[in-house]
Image (cartoon, helix red, strand yellow):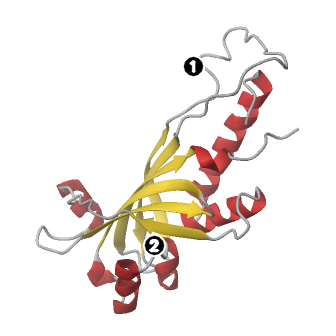
Amino acid sequence: MWPDTYVARLQALALVQTLNADVLASRSATLTLEAWCRDHQLAEEPTIIADLVRGVAKAPTAEQRQRLQVTPQAEVKYRRVQLRCGTRVFSEADNWYVPDRLTADMNRLLNATGTPFGKVVQPMEPYRQTFAVKLLWSPLPHGWELGSIVVSTGTAGVLAIPDALFEHRAVLYTREHKPFSEVDEVYKRQLLAFPPPR
């Protein structure tokens, strides 16, 4: 649990911004989350598992089809997952992808297993192009730098961390620069489920 102090809020802000930047700079959000899990010892086995959320369907919008460079008739599949490390859910992701641009084996793995999308498509050497980033929580109030902040003492309560920290929307491309997937990822509170730095 994080104490509700000025220093703890600064530390939380720095950690959220660091992870945000790490995901933005990476080719694979899955591998970035695995490194975060390992470095912060959030699970005995720092492996990201994708839990498929069944019974949810979201058709791609005209804008998404445009970003994926597919016709209105082309098949675009939808997959919703929770990415977890151990018992901790790190992110929830909506994924629209073009099955014709993946191999048969990749499509089989996506349909039948909990292998994260990023690991399934790794042989394609994909890269991400993020087109929207939204910070959903700031530990410091708006305009904090303009006024005086009352620094809490050791008797402060517990910092209330909301479920959602930040959101990324990105398009994934093959090494040949062909778009094949669009993701909408919301990163979760469990990423901070370790004691604050001393």
In three-dimensional space, the C-alpha distance between marks 2 and 1, rounded to whole angstroms, equals: 36 Å
Q: Residues within 10 Å of mark 1 (few under 14, many from 20)?
A: few
The quarter in which the C terminus is drawn is top right
Specify the farthest residue to the bottom.
Answer: 104
Q: Which residue is mark 2?
A: 117
Find residue 142 and name its label: 1
**Based on the displayed image, in which of its 4 quarters is residue 55 positioned?**
bottom left
Position of 83 with respect to 76 (left or right) is right
Horizontal side of 154 relative to 59 (left or right) equals: right
* Disc 2 and disc 1 in contact, CB within 8 angstroms: no
Instruction: Identify the mark nearer the N-term, 2 or 1.
Output: 2
The vertical placement of 145 against 33, above or below, is: above
Which residue shows up at 41% across the image and 83% down it? 109
For the N terminus, the image quarter is top right
- The image shows residue 61 at horizontal and vertical percentages of 20, 55
Residue type marked 2:
Phe
Label 2, secondary structure: give it: helix
- The amino acid type of the residue labelled 1 equals His
